[in-house]
Image (cartoon, rainbow, N blue to C red):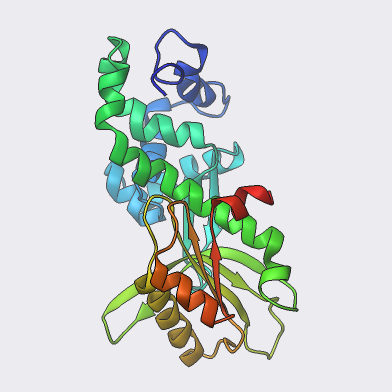
Amino acid sequence: MVRTVLDRRTSIFREGRYLLAEEPDIRDPALYHSVLSAVAAGNNTWGGIAGHIGYRSSDIAHPLNVLKDCGLLVREKDAFRSGRTRYRIAEPLITFYQAIMRPEWSDLGLGLAEEVWRRSQQRFLSKVMGPHFETLCREYALRHGREHFGEGGIGEVAAGTVADPVARTQIDVDVAVLGPAYPGEPRTVRSLGEAEWDKLMGVRHLERLRRARDLLSAKGYETSGTVLACYSGAGFDDDLRAEAARDPAVLLVDLPALYGRA
């Protein structure tokens, strides 16, 4: 990172800025950078983006649509909450620029790349690598779901939010695999998955998925064959591996599996 994207002498150093400047429909770059910065910071709903940049929700409709039409933003619907959508930056380089480079632009301009990178490690993991890894896991589930999740088609793969009224909280499902939607029939949940790039996964991750499955079953979803999947870049502890060995409805996907079958 220090020798390439953060080095002011390389061509890629300003690429995150140039990608936005090259779009002919963008006439107020500061506003569009603010919208992208809000998404990169984790504000991925319409209201969250507006609140982060201090605008009314109605005032950001145009920049959101322009960024989506340019292919810089992707709008994805929540798998379990009708009418709720999330926004995601399509190009990881732009996420990196907004989350890491833009706040540190002055120091990077002074050539302090190594210092900036040293203090940006945690932000990089949570704001860049984490969301990108979740996207890769959803792509993997879409490509290989038919062999992992039993017979039946795949209607969609998305992130989703499951409300837990007893705990008065919500469970974020990183990889929700749903069967096709047939009128008059309950929607089948083929798989529920959690993705962790830099954390060793354990049974507590599996229990959260089990709770989400039970809540969805109570809401009328078909969950009798739901596979609970843990996707990890750091691996799994012994207890979770033992659970997966005992229960065929538990799937563990590590980096060799994820990248070896791209």
On the rendered image, what quadrant is the N terminus found in? top left
| Residue 47 image offset from top left, x and y in percent | 35, 56
Relative height, residue 213 to residue 147 (above, below): below
Q: Image quadrant of residue 158?
A: bottom right
The answer to whether residue 179 is seen in the rendering is yes
Does residue 215 appear left or right of residue 190 in this picture? left
Identify the image quadrant of residue 117. Answer: top left
Nearer to the camera, 103 or 196? 196
Residue shown at the point (26%, 80%) measured from the top left: 168
**x%, y% of residue 86?**
47, 57
Taking the image as shown, residue 258 lies to the left or right of residue 61, namely: right
Q: Is residue 80 above or below residue 31?
A: below
Residue 240 position (above or below residue 44): below
From the top left corner, tell me how far across and down residue 26 is, in percent.
Answer: 51, 28
Across and down, in percent, residue 163 comes to: 37, 78
The reply to whether residue 155 is visible in this rendering is no
Q: Quadrant of residue 182?
A: bottom right
Image position of 149 (left or right of 28): right
Q: Nearer the viewer, residue 101 or 193?
A: 193
Residue in the picture at 26% in, 82% down? 167
